[in-house]
């Protein structure tokens, strides 16, 4: 086990009868990373998170959090972990502030004399200071998510596990939470972020993993994941049919014509140089209007790995 890993799982498996909801997952979340955890409906992502937090027991396999083997070290490790999983649960008749006070009182190091300061700081950090006196039942879905996040931030956390933290938030709230996650990572926290918003993952995460049907299909830095995908060259020309023939001869894989554009794979044997492709076209008298090379987006990578679109249902 690498001390630089905040989360490590080895062969983590959870079976419900004959169904393997999570099947032999070997996950590594580097310390200090913002780690996007992605998967379609029924992929086993939420089940994995629940096992990591000790909410359900695995059928087999092992895992560690913050360098400590679990569940043996749960009593000393879990207080260093903040979590927002499957929606927060609070008393509807209490205010946001009073809910946090009760939540704080249940903590293992709940010092009464410093409670008010912790609560107010957490409310301010998630943008709920002005609404702290309102009853929870009057909160919107986005405000409830903010309060759940505040409960995870009552104390400094080395690891944060956030399940859909921007659910129900407007664009402004989403930007605020995105910036907060960046700030938490800059302060030294590791963040495991489960989200169906692939654009959000691309903007805020340094690493990601993709699950499907209980199995881990890929993991790594976003740059490495994109690099493993298919890079394509797209050329706009005046004679696309002729250009496709020339580019195929230059080593471009699977050239396709779409209107005035010709596209093809760059990541093939010999790795054709875009500059060479352009030169071959110009020397052949084909007029080139534009030439670009593109890496797959995270969404395109997701579809390529899972063979399906992203389903926001869980």
Image (cartoon, helix red, strand yellow):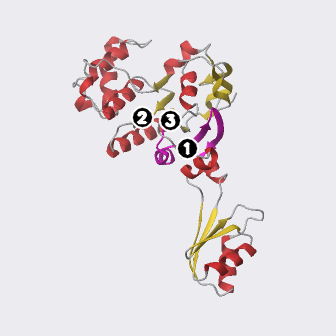
Among the two numbered marks 1 and 2 on one chain, the one whose residue lies closer to the N terminus: 2
> Which mark identifies residue 236?
none
- Residue 225: x and y in percent read 63, 48
- Residue 151: x and y in percent read 38, 24
Quadrant in the rendering for residue 164: top left
Q: Residue furthest bottom?
A: 285
Where disc 3 sits, the SS reads: strand
Q: Which residue is mark 2?
A: 165
Where disc 2 sits, the SS reads: loop
Position above or below: 266 against 80:
below
Q: CA distance from mark 3 to mark 1?
A: 13 Å
Q: Residue furthest front?
A: 18
Q: Which residue is mark 1?
A: 206
Q: Are marks 1 and 2 in contact (CB under 8 Å)?
A: no
> Which mark identifies residue 194?
3
Among the two numbered marks 3 and 1 on one chain, the one whose residue lies closer to the N terminus: 3
- Residue 150: x and y in percent read 37, 27
Q: Which residues are magenta?
A: 195-222
Q: Nearer the viewer, mark 1 or mark 2?
A: 2
Q: CA distance from mark 1 to mark 2?
A: 17 Å
- Residue at 61% across / 35% down in the picture? 30
Quadrant in the rendering for residue 147: top left
Q: CA distance from mark 2 to mark 3?
A: 8 Å
Where disc 1 sits, the SS reads: loop
Q: Give the class, few, some or many, for how many residues have Cα within 10 Å of label 3's Cα (few <14, many ≥20).
A: many
Q: Quadrant of the N terminus?
A: top right
Asked whether residue 213 is drawn in magenta, I would say yes
Front residue of 277/132: it is: 277
Position above or below: 221 against 111:
below
Q: Give the class, few, some or many, for how many residues have Cα within 10 Å of label 2's Cα (few <14, many ≥20).
A: many
């Amino acid at each position: 086990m690498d001390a630089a890993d905040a989360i490590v799982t080895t062969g983590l498996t959870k079976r419900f009868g004959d169904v393997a909801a999570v099947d032999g997952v070997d996950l590594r979340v580097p310390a200090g990373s913002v780690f996007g955890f992605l998967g379609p409906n029924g992929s086993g992502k939420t089940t994995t998170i629940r096992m990591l937090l000790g909410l359900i027991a695995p059928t087999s396999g092992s895992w560690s959090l913050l360098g400590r083997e679990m569940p043996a070290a749960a009593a000393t490790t879990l207080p260093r972990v903040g979590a927002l999983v499957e929606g927060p649960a609070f008393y509807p008749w209490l205010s946001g502030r009073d809910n946090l006070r009760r939540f704080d009182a249940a903590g293992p190091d709940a010092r009464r004399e410093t409670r008010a300061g912790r609560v107010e700081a957490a409310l301010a950090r998630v943008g709920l200071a002005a609404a702290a006196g309102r009853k929870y039942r009057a909160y919107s879905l986005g405000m409830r998510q903010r309060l759940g996040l505040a409960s995870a931030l009552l104390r400094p956390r080395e690891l944060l596990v956030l399940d859909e933290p921007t659910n129900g938030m407007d664009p402004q709230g989403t930007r605020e939470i995105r910036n907060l996650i960046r700030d938490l990572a800059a302060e030294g926290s590791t963040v495991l972020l489960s989200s169906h918003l692939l654009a959000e993952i691309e903007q805020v995460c340094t690493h990601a993993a993709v699950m499907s049907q209980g199995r881990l299909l890929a993991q790594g830095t976003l740059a490495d994941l994109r690099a493993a995908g298919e890079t394509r060259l797209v050329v706009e020309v005046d004679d696309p049919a002729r250009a496709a023939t020339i580019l195929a001869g230059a080593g471009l894989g699977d050239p396709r014509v779409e209107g005035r554009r010709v596209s093809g794979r760059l990541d093939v044997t010999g790795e054709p140089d875009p500059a060479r492709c352009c030169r071959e076209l110009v020397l052949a008298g084909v007029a080139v209007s534009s030439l670009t090379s593109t890496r797959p987006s995270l969404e395109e990578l997701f579809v390529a790995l899972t063979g399906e679109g992203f389903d926001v249902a869980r």
